[in-house]
Image (cartoon, helix red, strand yellow):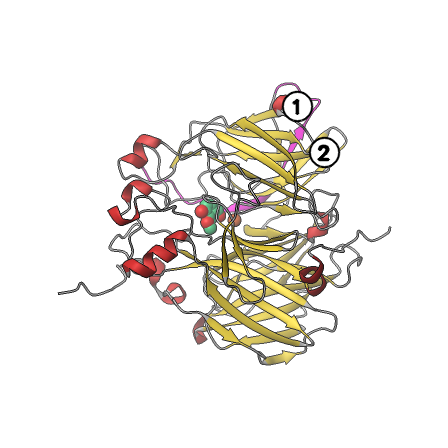
Amino acid sequence: MVEPLRFPENDLFKGWGDPLRCETTIDGLEVIQGAIPEGLEGTLYRVGADWQYPSKRTDDIFIDGEGMIHSFRFENGQASYRSRWVHTDRYKLQTQTKRQVFGRYRNRYTNEPEAADTDMGTANTTAMFHAGHLYALKESDLPYEVDPDTLETIGKSDMAGQIGSISFTAHPKVDPITNELLGFAYQAKGDATRDIVYYLFGGDGRKKQEIWFEMPYAACVHDFAITDEWVVFPFFPLITDLDVIKDGGAFYQWHPDQETVIALVPRYGDDASGIRWFRGPATSAGHMLNAVREGTKVHLDLCLYEGNCFPFFTTPQGEPTPPVPPFLTRITLDLERNDGGFEKTRLMGPSCEMPRTDDRYQGRAYRHGYMIIYRAQDGSSSTGHLDLQTGEIDVYSPGPGDTVQECQFVPRSPDSAEGDGWLLVPVARVSQGRSDLVILDARNLAAGPVATIKLPVRVRATFHGCWVPAETLETGRYDYALSEG
Ligand code: V55
Ligand code: FE
């Protein structure tokens, strides 16, 4: 008898997380409230994970699963929605095996024999548009190029032979003012290697710099931050041990006895000689809001956990770690301080994650941050706007039981003032088993949406994405500017 396909008992697959496993195309989405603002022309790309086939294991985690890329396109006052699997090597193999043949998250030693020689990249984390090309990214593999209109996968890309590492980050920074792409790869020569490489590409897609150096340990480097002169790499002690993964164990262990280490790498440097190092007690973070240089100081603003940000990764002894909330925190690295330490300051009261800015201000003096604010009591979440100058928080709450995904800021015009624009927010209407995309005025979230676009289907969790103006899709370049004064 053929074994029935059935998802194992795991909270991941319940409720909103119920695998959807299908692709969607909807033109002319219904606008059930308000109207799509004039001038909003372009595409919001989002990437998340879904489950191609059930596994027999019960150790799956939410950051695993096959990549699904979603587009919300705004054209002539109408919106359309599309979702497509990213045809990674592993997705393609499983269309042949017709069952799950990949094992535990990033652990190739737990794969079925059929999958022994196939890369495990899932392309499930974010979308990036640079130099005329759209990509779906996972930090453990090279980018997959995707057609910006049809979302069909074009193929795995080393960017015309320019990426020599085995992988590329899922948190690149495309600077929409200079059109530069800043990115990196960690464990860049293979599982558990300490190699990290920083890449800088010009707006024409040509590599300008790469700097290889070594991490203090084989860390999980999910995100980084940029300033005008430095790029900031934080290393947190979620560490890969080759012996453990060879034994079928988890890809990371949490080491509370190890330090947080931060490297400042010259943004336009030629080699590793100018790197500066800073150290503090064990903390962790997935996501950075921004970084900014102020004289001889570099401020790194991030959602910091005073402990392990991923409780599903245990200590080396297999002990679980208590969940801790993330708080928006400013880490200040002073280049004139010679003891290698750093200062920490809390920036915001409520716990928050998935922080974003007006992307024109990444690495520049800035005032506005946007984030998901979680309410532990009823499981709901809201979109917040923090004014870093006044400390005021403006909040949009989607309603009881409903949740928001990471927001995307879109400037009202290419040179509008910082924070003058819209927030696009995918909303889970949990009780209705479907989604909305709401458009908020970024300067007045509490007023509620200027438009609510109905998705008659569920848009499962997506992690991250990007906004590509219609004109940028044509020219391959962002035509944004910083407003005067
Ligand atoms: C993170 C997410 C990932 C991953 C590793 O948020 C770290 C952190 C979505 O996939 O593979
Ligand atoms: Fe992320």
The total of numbered circles placed on residues is: 2
Residue 165 vs residue 371, the one in the foreground: 165
In the image, what residue occupies the spot 60% across and 63% down?
44
Instruction: State yes or no: discs 1 and 2 in contact (Cβ < 8 Å).
Output: no
Dot 1 or dot 2: first in sequence order is: 2
Q: Which residues are magenta?
A: 318-339
Disc 1 residue type?
Gly
**Residue 92 % position (x, y):** 37, 57
Residue at the right extreme of this rendering: 485
**Residue 235 % position (x, y):** 52, 33
- Binning the other alpha carbons within 10 Å of mark 1 as few (below 14), some (14 to 19) or many (20 upward) gives few
Task: Indicate whether 355 appears above or below 27.
Answer: above
Task: Indicate whether 22 appears above or below 166.
Answer: below
One can see residue 55 in this view: yes
In the image, what residue occupies the spot 56% across and 68% down?
398
Residue 342 vs residue 439, the one in the foreground: 439
**Residue 46 % position (x, y):** 54, 60
Residue 38 vs residue 343, the one in the foreground: 38
Residue identifier under label 1: 274
Q: Is residue 440 left or right of residue 118?
A: right
Q: CA distance from mark 1 to mark 2?
A: 11 Å
Q: Secondary structure at mark 2?
A: loop
Q: Is residue 226 left or right of residue 127?
A: right
Residue identifier under label 2: 229
